[in-house]
Amino acid sequence: MEALLHALVIDIGAGTADFCVMQGRYPTEEDQKTLPNAGDSIDEQLVKLIRERHPEAQFSIHMLREWKEKWSFVGEPKDHVMVTVPIKGKATRDRYHAGNARGVRKHPAAGVRDDDDVADKSRA
């Protein structure tokens, strides 16, 4: 129990995000909070952002979740993310940057492409 003294336990599921402050005793209701927005609402926002920017992209919610689970992190993005997206039936690799995502900040799979990424494609 000592390892959990003054720790914050976070459980982000599909439907809720649960937080619990560990203070060296069994947590009370006041030590625990639940937010109703979690993985599913992030997925919905990502789908919306990608469809706005790339209406020709053909992807499923399962593909998006795979990208999200592979590339998600907490912190500042250090580089672009390469994902393969079917466009007009052809697998296309594209670079995305998390820093410009509106609404889903710091999420590499957000699908917001920097303008200068198009020029960088030849180097990718």
Image (spheres, helix red, strand yellow):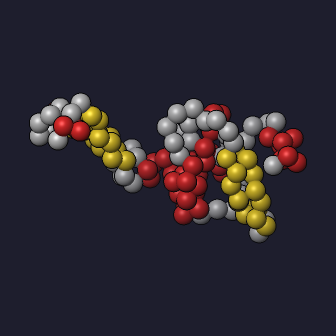
Task: Please tell me which residue is depicted at 39% across the width and 54% down the height of the picture.
Answer: 14
Q: Which residue reaches farthest bottom?
A: 89
Q: Position of residue 78 (x, y in %)?
A: 64, 35
Q: Position of residue 112 (x, y in %)?
A: 68, 42
Task: Please tell me which residue is depicted at 21% across the width and 33% down the height of the picture.
Answer: 5
Horizontal relation, residue 39 to residue 70: left or right: left
Horizontal relation, residue 15 to residue 57: left or right: left
Observer-nearest of 38 and 52: 38
- The total number of labels drawn is 0
Decide if residue 87 is in sight here.
yes
Q: Which residue reaches farthest front?
A: 2
Decide if residue 28 is in sight here.
no
Task: Please tell me which residue is depicted at 23% across the width and 39% down the height of the picture.
Answer: 3
Observer-nearest of 124 and 41: 124
Q: Position of residue 32 (x, y in %)?
A: 21, 38
Observer-nearest of 5 and 70: 5
Q: Position of residue 29 (x, y in %)?
A: 14, 37
**Quadrant of image for the N terminus:** top left
Q: Is residue 29 above or below residue 123?
A: above
Horizontal relation, residue 4 to residue 110: left or right: left
Horizontal relation, residue 111 to residue 24: left or right: right
Task: Please tell me which residue is depicted at 27% across the width and 34% down the height of the picture.
Answer: 7
